Amino acid sequence: MNVTDAVAARRSVRGFLDTPVETDMLKDILTRAARAATGGNLQPWHIDLVTGSAMVEFKAMMMAKLLSGAMEEPAYAIYPPGLTAPYRDRRFAIGEAMYAEIGIPREDKAARRMWFARNFQFFGAPSGLFCTVDRQMGPPQWADLGMYLQNVMLLAVEAGLGTCAQECWAVFPETVTTFLGTPPERMLFCGMAIGFEDKAEPANRLRSPRAPEAEWLTVRS
Ligand SMILES: Cc1cc2nc3c(=O)[nH]c(=O)nc-3n(C[C@H](O)[C@H](O)[C@H](O)COP(=O)(O)O)c2cc1C
Protein backbone atom coordinates (compact mmCIF):
# COMPACT_ATOMS: atom_id res chain seq x y z
CA MET A 1 0.00 0.00 0.00
CA ASN A 2 1.37 3.41 -0.89
CA VAL A 3 0.81 6.67 1.00
CA THR A 4 -1.84 7.90 -1.45
CA ASP A 5 -3.86 4.72 -0.97
CA ALA A 6 -3.55 4.83 2.81
CA VAL A 7 -4.65 8.48 2.96
CA ALA A 8 -7.60 7.74 0.71
CA ALA A 9 -8.62 4.61 2.60
CA ARG A 10 -8.44 6.03 6.14
CA ARG A 11 -11.80 6.90 7.62
CA SER A 12 -13.36 6.81 11.03
CA VAL A 13 -14.55 3.35 12.01
CA ARG A 14 -17.36 3.28 14.56
CA GLY A 15 -18.00 -0.41 14.99
CA PHE A 16 -15.33 -3.06 15.63
CA LEU A 17 -15.08 -6.81 15.91
CA ASP A 18 -14.01 -8.06 19.33
CA THR A 19 -11.13 -9.90 17.62
CA PRO A 20 -8.03 -9.05 19.66
CA VAL A 21 -5.17 -7.15 18.04
CA GLU A 22 -1.66 -8.30 18.89
CA THR A 23 -0.05 -5.93 21.35
CA ASP A 24 3.26 -6.12 19.49
CA MET A 25 1.58 -5.00 16.29
CA LEU A 26 0.04 -2.02 18.08
CA LYS A 27 3.31 -1.12 19.78
CA ASP A 28 5.02 -1.27 16.42
CA ILE A 29 2.50 1.15 14.87
CA LEU A 30 2.70 3.55 17.81
CA THR A 31 6.49 3.51 17.70
CA ARG A 32 6.79 4.03 13.94
CA ALA A 33 4.23 6.87 14.06
CA ALA A 34 6.71 8.84 16.16
CA ARG A 35 8.61 9.65 12.93
CA ALA A 36 6.07 12.50 12.66
CA ALA A 37 7.56 15.95 12.28
CA THR A 38 7.34 18.23 15.31
CA GLY A 39 8.33 21.83 15.81
CA GLY A 40 11.79 21.85 17.45
CA ASN A 41 11.62 18.03 17.53
CA LEU A 42 9.72 18.36 20.83
CA GLN A 43 7.73 15.14 20.25
CA PRO A 44 5.17 16.39 22.76
CA TRP A 45 2.94 13.31 22.77
CA HIS A 46 2.46 10.81 25.56
CA ILE A 47 0.52 7.72 24.57
CA ASP A 48 -1.20 5.16 26.78
CA LEU A 49 -2.14 1.99 24.94
CA VAL A 50 -5.04 0.19 26.59
CA THR A 51 -5.71 -3.36 25.44
CA GLY A 52 -6.43 -6.89 26.66
CA SER A 53 -7.60 -7.20 30.25
CA ALA A 54 -6.78 -3.54 30.95
CA MET A 55 -9.34 -2.60 28.28
CA VAL A 56 -11.93 -4.96 29.77
CA GLU A 57 -11.38 -3.32 33.15
CA PHE A 58 -11.47 0.19 31.67
CA LYS A 59 -14.72 -0.40 29.76
CA ALA A 60 -16.43 -1.81 32.87
CA MET A 61 -15.31 1.21 34.86
CA MET A 62 -16.56 3.57 32.12
CA MET A 63 -19.91 1.80 31.92
CA ALA A 64 -20.38 2.26 35.68
CA LYS A 65 -19.42 5.91 35.29
CA LEU A 66 -21.97 6.49 32.53
CA LEU A 67 -24.71 4.71 34.45
CA SER A 68 -23.97 6.89 37.49
CA GLY A 69 -24.84 9.94 35.37
CA ALA A 70 -21.96 11.88 36.98
CA MET A 71 -20.40 14.47 34.68
CA GLU A 72 -16.99 16.16 34.90
CA GLU A 73 -15.42 19.48 34.03
CA PRO A 74 -14.25 18.96 30.42
CA ALA A 75 -10.51 19.07 29.79
CA TYR A 76 -11.04 21.80 27.17
CA ALA A 77 -13.73 23.18 24.87
CA ILE A 78 -13.97 20.60 22.09
CA TYR A 79 -15.40 23.21 19.72
CA PRO A 80 -15.16 26.98 20.04
CA PRO A 81 -18.25 28.43 21.67
CA GLY A 82 -20.42 30.07 19.00
CA LEU A 83 -18.73 28.16 16.19
CA THR A 84 -19.53 30.03 12.97
CA ALA A 85 -20.19 29.00 9.36
CA PRO A 86 -18.89 27.16 7.45
CA TYR A 87 -17.49 25.02 10.30
CA ARG A 88 -20.77 24.87 12.20
CA ASP A 89 -22.55 23.71 9.05
CA ARG A 90 -19.96 21.02 8.32
CA ARG A 91 -20.26 19.72 11.86
CA PHE A 92 -24.05 19.64 11.64
CA ALA A 93 -23.95 17.94 8.24
CA ILE A 94 -21.64 15.09 9.30
CA GLY A 95 -23.73 14.46 12.41
CA GLU A 96 -26.93 14.29 10.40
CA ALA A 97 -25.29 12.09 7.75
CA MET A 98 -24.19 9.68 10.47
CA TYR A 99 -27.59 9.45 12.12
CA ALA A 100 -29.27 9.07 8.72
CA GLU A 101 -26.95 6.14 7.97
CA ILE A 102 -27.94 4.37 11.17
CA GLY A 103 -31.57 5.46 10.97
CA ILE A 104 -31.97 7.59 14.10
CA PRO A 105 -34.12 10.69 13.43
CA ARG A 106 -33.44 14.12 14.99
CA GLU A 107 -36.46 13.90 17.29
CA ASP A 108 -35.17 10.71 18.92
CA LYS A 109 -32.71 12.43 21.21
CA ALA A 110 -32.55 9.48 23.62
CA ALA A 111 -31.52 7.07 20.85
CA ARG A 112 -28.91 9.57 19.60
CA ARG A 113 -27.51 9.92 23.12
CA MET A 114 -27.39 6.14 23.50
CA TRP A 115 -25.59 5.78 20.20
CA PHE A 116 -23.11 8.53 21.08
CA ALA A 117 -22.37 6.72 24.35
CA ARG A 118 -20.83 3.91 22.30
CA ASN A 119 -17.85 6.24 22.02
CA PHE A 120 -17.18 5.44 25.66
CA GLN A 121 -16.85 1.75 24.93
CA PHE A 122 -14.43 2.51 22.06
CA PHE A 123 -17.20 1.43 19.65
CA GLY A 124 -16.49 -2.15 20.68
CA ALA A 125 -12.78 -2.03 19.80
CA PRO A 126 -10.60 -4.33 21.90
CA SER A 127 -7.80 -1.76 21.92
CA GLY A 128 -7.41 1.96 22.12
CA LEU A 129 -5.03 4.71 23.01
CA PHE A 130 -5.12 7.91 24.96
CA CYS A 131 -2.98 10.89 24.04
CA THR A 132 -1.95 13.25 26.82
CA VAL A 133 0.18 16.36 26.62
CA ASP A 134 2.18 18.49 29.03
CA ARG A 135 0.06 21.45 30.13
CA GLN A 136 2.79 23.92 29.19
CA MET A 137 2.30 23.09 25.51
CA GLY A 138 0.35 25.43 23.25
CA PRO A 139 -1.32 25.34 19.82
CA PRO A 140 1.85 24.48 17.84
CA GLN A 141 2.53 21.43 19.99
CA TRP A 142 -1.11 20.35 19.91
CA ALA A 143 -0.84 20.47 16.12
CA ASP A 144 2.17 18.14 16.47
CA LEU A 145 -0.07 15.67 18.32
CA GLY A 146 -2.32 15.63 15.26
CA MET A 147 0.59 14.72 13.02
CA TYR A 148 1.48 11.82 15.26
CA LEU A 149 -2.10 10.60 15.46
CA GLN A 150 -2.55 10.82 11.69
CA ASN A 151 0.56 8.66 11.29
CA VAL A 152 -0.98 6.13 13.68
CA MET A 153 -4.20 6.06 11.67
CA LEU A 154 -2.38 5.64 8.34
CA LEU A 155 -0.12 2.89 9.66
CA ALA A 156 -3.20 1.19 11.08
CA VAL A 157 -4.80 1.23 7.61
CA GLU A 158 -1.67 -0.39 6.21
CA ALA A 159 -1.90 -3.07 8.92
CA GLY A 160 -5.54 -3.78 8.04
CA LEU A 161 -6.89 -2.05 11.15
CA GLY A 162 -9.57 0.58 11.58
CA THR A 163 -9.40 3.59 13.89
CA CYS A 164 -11.53 6.39 15.21
CA ALA A 165 -9.92 9.41 16.85
CA GLN A 166 -12.07 10.43 19.81
CA GLU A 167 -11.98 13.84 21.44
CA CYS A 168 -15.20 12.93 23.27
CA TRP A 169 -12.96 11.58 26.04
CA ALA A 170 -12.22 15.20 26.94
CA VAL A 171 -15.56 15.23 28.80
CA PHE A 172 -14.27 12.61 31.25
CA PRO A 173 -10.69 13.75 31.89
CA GLU A 174 -10.71 12.88 35.58
CA THR A 175 -11.90 9.32 35.05
CA VAL A 176 -9.46 8.68 32.21
CA THR A 177 -6.38 10.23 33.79
CA THR A 178 -7.06 8.57 37.15
CA PHE A 179 -7.28 5.19 35.43
CA LEU A 180 -4.07 5.87 33.52
CA GLY A 181 -2.23 7.40 36.47
CA THR A 182 -1.42 10.46 34.38
CA PRO A 183 0.79 12.91 36.31
CA PRO A 184 -0.87 16.26 37.10
CA GLU A 185 1.39 18.21 34.73
CA ARG A 186 -0.20 16.42 31.80
CA MET A 187 -3.70 16.77 30.39
CA LEU A 188 -5.82 14.57 28.19
CA PHE A 189 -6.18 15.46 24.52
CA CYS A 190 -8.03 12.54 22.98
CA GLY A 191 -8.50 8.84 22.66
CA MET A 192 -8.51 6.55 19.65
CA ALA A 193 -10.33 3.28 19.12
CA ILE A 194 -8.25 0.69 17.25
CA GLY A 195 -9.28 -2.71 15.96
CA PHE A 196 -10.69 -4.72 13.11
CA GLU A 197 -13.66 -3.08 11.43
CA ASP A 198 -17.07 -4.66 11.82
CA LYS A 199 -18.22 -4.45 8.22
CA ALA A 200 -21.80 -5.25 9.28
CA GLU A 201 -22.04 -2.07 11.38
CA PRO A 202 -24.26 0.44 9.51
CA ALA A 203 -22.31 3.42 10.89
CA ASN A 204 -19.29 2.18 8.97
CA ARG A 205 -21.08 2.85 5.69
CA LEU A 206 -20.62 6.58 6.29
CA ARG A 207 -18.29 8.32 3.86
CA SER A 208 -17.58 11.84 5.04
CA PRO A 209 -17.56 14.57 2.40
CA ARG A 210 -14.88 17.23 2.03
CA ALA A 211 -15.38 20.89 1.25
CA PRO A 212 -14.44 21.77 -2.33
CA GLU A 213 -10.88 23.01 -2.47
CA ALA A 214 -12.06 26.42 -3.69
CA GLU A 215 -13.32 26.97 -0.10
CA TRP A 216 -9.93 26.60 1.51
CA LEU A 217 -7.14 26.56 -1.09
CA THR A 218 -5.54 29.71 -2.43
CA VAL A 219 -2.87 29.34 -5.07
CA ARG A 220 -0.66 32.22 -6.10
CA SER A 221 1.67 31.48 -8.95
C1 LIG B 1 -9.00 14.83 16.90
C2 LIG B 1 -10.25 14.15 16.44
C3 LIG B 1 -11.23 13.83 17.35
C4 LIG B 1 -12.39 13.15 16.95
N1 LIG B 1 -13.32 12.81 17.90
C5 LIG B 1 -14.36 12.01 17.56
C6 LIG B 1 -15.23 11.50 18.55
O1 LIG B 1 -15.11 11.78 19.74
N2 LIG B 1 -16.20 10.64 18.17
C7 LIG B 1 -16.39 10.29 16.86
O2 LIG B 1 -17.30 9.50 16.57
N3 LIG B 1 -15.58 10.77 15.88
C8 LIG B 1 -14.57 11.61 16.21
N4 LIG B 1 -13.69 12.06 15.25
C9 LIG B 1 -13.88 11.64 13.86
C10 LIG B 1 -14.39 12.78 12.99
O3 LIG B 1 -15.76 12.96 13.18
C11 LIG B 1 -14.07 12.42 11.53
O4 LIG B 1 -12.67 12.38 11.37
C12 LIG B 1 -14.63 13.38 10.50
O5 LIG B 1 -16.04 13.41 10.54
C13 LIG B 1 -14.18 12.99 9.09
O6 LIG B 1 -14.57 11.66 8.80
P1 LIG B 1 -13.49 10.53 8.45
O7 LIG B 1 -12.56 10.41 9.61
O8 LIG B 1 -14.31 9.28 8.27
O9 LIG B 1 -12.77 10.95 7.20
C14 LIG B 1 -12.56 12.79 15.60
C15 LIG B 1 -11.55 13.12 14.68
C16 LIG B 1 -10.43 13.79 15.08
C17 LIG B 1 -9.36 14.10 14.08
Image (cartoon, grey):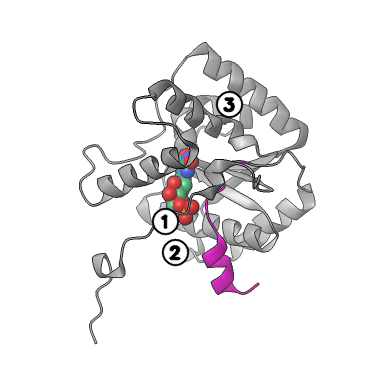
Q: Crowding near pointer 3: few (<14 within 10 Å), some, many (20+)? A: few
Q: Crowding near pointer 1: few (<14 within 10 Å), some, many (20+)? A: some
Q: Do the residues labelled 2 and 1 touch (CB within 8 Å)?
A: yes
Q: Is residue 81 above or below residue 60?
A: below
Query: Which is more N-terminal, label 3 or label 2?
Result: 2
Q: Is residue 90 visible?
A: yes
Residue tagged by mark 1?
Answer: 143
Residue 93: x percent and y percent? Answer: 33, 46
Q: Can residue 131 be seen in this view?
A: no
Q: Residue furthest bottom?
A: 221
Left or right: 160 in relation to 72: right
Q: Is mark 1 on a helix, strand or loop?
A: helix
Which amino acid, mark 1?
Ala
Residue 183: x percent and y percent? Answer: 56, 34
Residue tagged by mark 3?
Answer: 178
Task: Report the span colored magenta.
Answer: 1-15
Residue tagged by mark 2?
Answer: 39
Query: Which is more N-terminal, label 1 or label 2?
Result: 2
Q: Is residue 12 magenta?
A: yes
Residue at image position (59%, 61%) is 154
Residue at image position (37%, 41%) is 96
Residue at image position (51%, 64%) is 41
Front in this rendered view, residue 44 or 94: 94
Residue 191: x percent and y percent? Answer: 54, 41
Q: In this view, does 119 lie above or below 204?
A: above
Tag in front: 2 or 1 = 1
Q: Indicate if the residue with disc 3 has its beta carbon within 8 Å of ligand 1.
A: no
Which amino acid, mark 3?
Thr
Q: Is mark 3 on a helix, strand or loop?
A: helix
